[in-house]
């Protein structure tokens, strides 16, 4: 089989890329190791920043998001029993975010792919990449017990942290950074009333909590826990007790509770592979970087990665120029490192640390006070939260990668 762009992975990065390429008349084939039911049925949270909102509208998959998503112009930071609202729209020049789960984005993108008359090859196994440093890279895989080969002009590795694409880049040139956090997030889905009209990020001496909204009757909330804790240690009663303790306010407000229908603990990591391209292979999304969820950047970075990639591919096929493709890593990394910085900043600002002495705890509270009351602090939170722009210009003289 032959195509222009072979895409490995039918997550947000791969599906958005395929739609962007389709609009440019560029053919692609998507390979996915999971089934359609699996990728559409795996429930994941999603906060889409303004750039991602714009991209989804641009590629014709924003209608349901606009109808059913919860658009927020601000959020709340809570500490010392009080809440302070950050007006995201005011301090970011009119931008906003939408709470729209990732699996819903995937459903919209899969439907758009089939509407375009294109297919997705699900349930593939043993995916390997070959000849990626030539003009005719290949993807080999097994489908229904048969060995198959896809010959491409380019390969887009959108296959996540554990996928084969990043590992196909030679170890000798692949440059990676990994930071593991001791904290994990215990997430729940509950049949309960909304806790607030916008997200609440709560700092408490017992640990961080996040109150989010899914629907009028289904909510998504999170608790900071030890990353190595076992979910069996967390009964429903214990979860609601902790959520209430960490989010109650001085005026007596308490969180609405209800039956919990799913719960689990995720570990947090910050990871960057600065080698986002090698030969005719370009990696995007979780294949290239992961962030702690505190900054709500994972899906959004995937969307902007493939926006850059698609523009580079369009330039190549239309003019023969490799200018953007040659600068793909450079352009993406400027935004990736800033998003990693913001996610790390939010994690340190909002999470409790049992090793802090009284001075360090005082500094953390002073930071929270500053960033929620001074215009410069409010603007910093708002601009980063709604998403920084893609920086396309050349950066001669600017060192973008670490030594």
Image (cartoon, grey):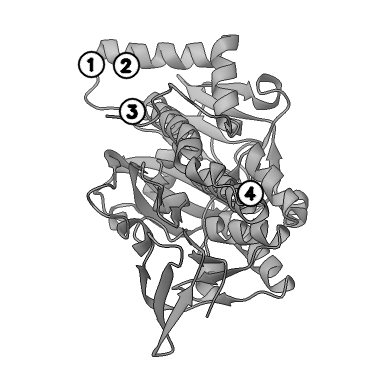
How crowded pointer 1 is (Cα within 10 Å; few <14, some 14-19, many 20+) is rated as: few
Which residue is identified by label 3?
352
Contact (Cβ within 8 Å) of mark 2 with mark 4: no
Marks 2 and 1 sit apart, C-alpha to C-alpha, by 6 Å
Marks 2 and 4 sit apart, C-alpha to C-alpha, by 51 Å
Quarter that holds the C terminus: top left
Quick one: SS at disc 3? loop
How crowded pointer 4 is (Cα within 10 Å; few <14, some 14-19, many 20+) is rated as: some
Nearer the camera: disc 4 or disc 1: 4
Which residue is identified by label 4?
315
Quick one: SS at disc 1? loop
Contact (Cβ within 8 Å) of mark 2 with mark 1: yes
Marks 2 and 3 sit apart, C-alpha to C-alpha, by 8 Å
Which residue is identified by label 1?
357
Quick one: SS at disc 2? helix
| Frontmost residue, 181 versus 155 | 155
**Where residue 312 sits in the image (x, y, percent)?**
58, 48
Contact (Cβ within 8 Å) of mark 4 with mark 1: no
Marks 4 and 1 sit apart, C-alpha to C-alpha, by 55 Å
**Where residue 148 sits in the image (x, y, percent)?**
43, 83
Vertical placement of residue 275 versus 152, above or below: above
Vertical placement of residue 236 versus 182, above or below: below
Label located before the other in sequence (2 or 3): 3
Label located before the other in sequence (3 or 4): 4
Q: Which mark is residue 361?
A: 2
Nearer the camera: disc 2 or disc 4: 4
């Amino acid at each position: 089989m032959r195509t222009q762009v072979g895409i490995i992975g039918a997550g947000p990065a791969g599906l958005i890329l395929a739609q962007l390429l389709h609009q440019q008349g560029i053919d692609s084939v998507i390979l996915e190791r999971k089934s359609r039911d699996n990728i559409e049925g795996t429930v994941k949270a999603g906060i889409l920043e303004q750039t991602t909102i714009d991209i989804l509208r641009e590629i014709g998959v924003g209608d349901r998001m606009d109808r059913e998503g919860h658009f927020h112009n601000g959020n709340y930071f809570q500490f010392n029993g009080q809440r302070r609202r950050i007006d995201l729209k005011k301090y970011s020049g009119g931008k906003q975010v939408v709470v729209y789960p990732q699996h819903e984005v995937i459903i919209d993108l899969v439907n758009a792919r089939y509407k375009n008359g294109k297919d997705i090859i699900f349930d593939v196994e043993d995916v390997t990449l070959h000849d990626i440093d030539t003009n005719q890279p290949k993807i080999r895989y097994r489908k229904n017990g048969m060995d198959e080969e896809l010959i491409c002009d380019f390969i887009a590795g959108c296959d996540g942290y554990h996928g084969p694409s990043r590992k196909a880049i030679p170890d000798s040139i692949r440059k990676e950074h990994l930071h593991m956090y001791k904290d994990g997030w215990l997430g729940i889905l509950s049949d309960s009333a909304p806790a607030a009209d916008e997200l609440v990020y709560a700092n408490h001496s017992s640990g961080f909590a996040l109150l989010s909204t899914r629907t009028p009757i289904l909510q998504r909330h999170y608790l900071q826990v030890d990353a190595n804790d076992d979910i069996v240690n967390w009964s429903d009663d214990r979860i609601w007790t902790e959520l209430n303790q960490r989010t109650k306010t001085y005026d007596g407000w308490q969180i609405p509770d209800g039956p919990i229908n799913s719960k689990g603990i995720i570990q947090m990591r910050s990871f960057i592979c600065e080698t986002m391209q090698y030969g005719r292979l370009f990696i995007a999304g979780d294949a290239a970087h992961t962030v702690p969820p505190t900054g709500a950047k994972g899906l959004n970075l995937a969307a902007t990665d493939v926006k850059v990639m698609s523009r580079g591919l369009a330039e190549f096929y239309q003019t023969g120029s490799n200018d953007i493709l040659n600068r793909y890593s450079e352009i993406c990394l400027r935004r990736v490192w800033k998003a990693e910085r913001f996610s790390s900043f939010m994690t340190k600002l909002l999470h409790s640390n049992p090793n802090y002495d009284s001075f360090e705890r005082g500094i953390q509270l002073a930071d929270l006070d500053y960033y929620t009351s001074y215009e410069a602090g409010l603007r910093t939170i708002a601009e980063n939260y709604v998403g920084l722009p893609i920086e396309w210009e050349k950066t001669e003289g600017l060192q973008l990668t670490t030594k």
